[in-house]
Amino acid sequence: MYEYKVVPAPVKGLKAKGVKTAEARFALAVEQAINDLAADGWDYVRTDVLPSEERQGLTGSVTHWRNLMMFRRTVVSDAVVEPVAPERVEPVLTAAPVVAAELPDAESVTAADVSEPAFEVEAEKTRPA
């Protein structure tokens, strides 16, 4: 899980030794803003331009576009949550209920009914090597 931080992007460059152009000064300001937050454990994600509607005068409003820098870092929680495996449930096999009307009478069962089942014997086939 992450927590996010949104800060306004720099609008003005920083002066430094050896940095002469306006683009280089602005890049230095952005670099320093990213490095300052990275020192606190924040990872730079992206920069977005988002609208901000503000009041102007008594009844009017105007939309300003703001440059915002997005950062995130991992949230460290005190409690470590370990996944719990679901308990295995064994299937229960039950026999179908036997109805007394389906059972033959002991007197009506003959020796032919109790004989061994006949199995067909096939010749053994071999696979070619």
Image: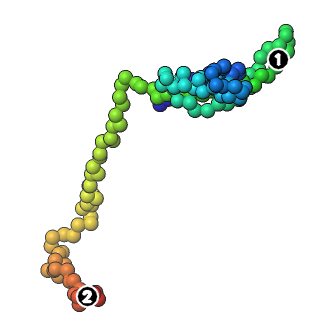
- Position of residue 35 measured from the top left corner of the image (x, y, whole percent): 54, 25
Q: Residue most toward the front? A: 18
Residue at the image position 77 percent from the left and 22 percent from the top: 64
Of residues 45 and 101, the one drawn nearer to the viewer in this rendering: 45
Q: Which residue is mark 1?
A: 61
Residue at the image position 34 percent from the left and 34 percent from the top: 82
- Residue 24 visible somewhere in the drawing: yes
- Residue 67 visible somewhere in the drawing: no
Side of 118 where 68 appears, left or right:
right
Q: Residues within 10 Å of mark 1 (few under 14, many from 20)?
A: few
- Position of residue 81 measured from the top left corner of the image (x, y, whole percent): 36, 31
- Say what amino acid the circle numbered 2 marks: Thr
Q: Quadrant of residue 49?
A: top right
Kindly state the secondary structure of the residue where label 1 is placed. strand
Kindly state the secondary structure of the residue where label 2 is placed. loop
Residue at the image position 26 percent from the left and 55 percent from the top: 94
Question: Which numbered disc, 1 or 2, marks the residue that appears first in the sequence?
Answer: 1
- Say what amino acid the circle numbered 1 marks: Ser
Q: Quadrant of residue 87?
A: top left
How many angstroms separate mark 1 from mark 2 (CA)? 91 Å
- Position of residue 29 measured from the top left corner of the image (x, y, whole percent): 64, 23
Task: Report the disc number at residue 126.
Answer: 2
Q: How is the image coloured?
A: rainbow
Closest to the camera, between mark 1 and mark 2, is 1
Which image quarter is the C terminus in?
A: bottom left
Side of 5 where 114 appears, left or right:
left
